[in-house]
Image (cartoon, grey):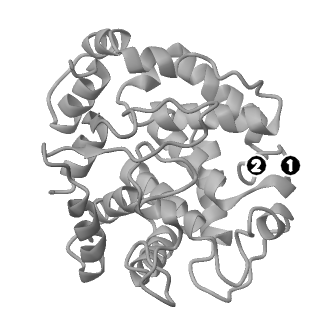
Amino acid sequence: MKEDTALSLKKIVDNGETLSEKQAKDMLNQSDLIGKLLTPPKRKPDTFVGVRAYEWRLLELSEIPFVDKLTQVQEWVDLLLEKTFIGDAFSLTGNRTGVLACHNAMISTILLKVSPKKKEHIDAGIRWILEYQQVERNQACRWDGGDLYTKYGGCMKAVPCFYGVVKSMIALTAYKRVFGPSDSLHDKLKNGLDYILKHKLFQRLSSNKPIEPSIIQNFYPYTYKTNVIELLSLMKDNDLLEHDHCQEALNLLKDKQQTDGFWQADLFFMKSAWIPFDPPGERGEWITYVVKRLGL
């Protein structure tokens, strides 16, 4: 099977090769995957589910270089901001009640990747992480939005939602790469990464069992859930891949390599809005590329 041109473009950019905007756009226009990703989600953006559908689509697009040059991507960014930005953070309901840690972080990361000029919005999302995201147990959170404590298991109870911590550290890492570090960002990022490392990236503190079954399954790109591929990529971006507490996750990933040298996607989520980069159970070109960048 011929490699999709969006993946070829990603490899070229990651290798530091020079490419003009016209050459990049030509490759995007030739990509079957980009064509699918730019098909508007079936859900209307005026609903809670619809807002998430556009967020998912932008999450996927943000994994591909030069998509920020596509008019439709910027139109969707503006739509997402119109529906989610409340001044202090990003909310799935458009008010203070609907701020959830993982989504605030993911939307911040989307902007950092495909619309860094929206710095006022980005700064608000990052500031929320610095002020309210807990990275230790039994710490009080001062945010007054209700969903953070009551819905979806509770983002900020005595044990902070692991997904929220991970996605927030990814957002801080991206911010540092784009705009540079600060003392407050450095401290929060270090504490959050330490918290993740205490879990050996994917294990419960009380046992060596996975925090959730899906955290040891292969999928790419990533939704609000995380897995060992994303966690190891986060460690690599922060020069922590050699840490002893990364070894079990690396071994787990090595064990999933197929006899042909490739990895496969095990599943994908949000099937009404999600476009799989690699069909589950088949030779995964995208997921293999991402895993091999970890040095495996």
Q: Nearer the viewer, residue 74 or 261?
A: 261
Q: Nearer the viewer, residue 178 or 4?
A: 4
- Residue 160 vs residue 252: left or right? right
Which quadrant is home to the C terminus? bottom left
Residue drawn at (80%, 70%), measured in percent from left and top?
149
Across and down, in percent, residue 80 comes to: 68, 33
Q: Is residue 246 above or below residue 224?
A: below
- Residue 192 vs residue 106: left or right? left
Across and down, in percent, residue 114 comes to: 47, 33
The amino acid beneath tag 2 is Ser
Residue drawn at (63%, 61%), measured in percent from left and top?
127
Q: Is residue 244 above or below residue 28?
A: below
Element on which disc 2 rests: loop
Across and down, in percent, residue 217 comes to: 41, 57
Q: Which residue is mark 2?
A: 91
Element on which disc 1 rests: loop
Q: Nearer the viewer, residue 279 or 184?
A: 279
Task: Classify residue 255 by image quadrant.
Answer: bottom left
Q: Is residue 138 above or below residue 114?
A: below
Q: In 3D space, how far apart are the residues under numbered discs 1 and 2 (Cα atoms)?
A: 6 Å
Residue drawn at (76%, 37%), measured in percent from left and top?
49
Across and down, in percent, residue 282 comes to: 31, 36
Q: Visible in this render: residue 231?
A: yes
Task: Classify residue 294 by image quadrant.
Answer: bottom left
Which quadrant is home to the N terminus? top left
The amino acid beneath tag 1 is Asn
* Contact between labelled residues 2 and 1, with CB atoms less than 8 Å apart: yes
Q: Which residue is mark 1?
A: 95
Q: Is residue 41 above or below residue 145?
A: above
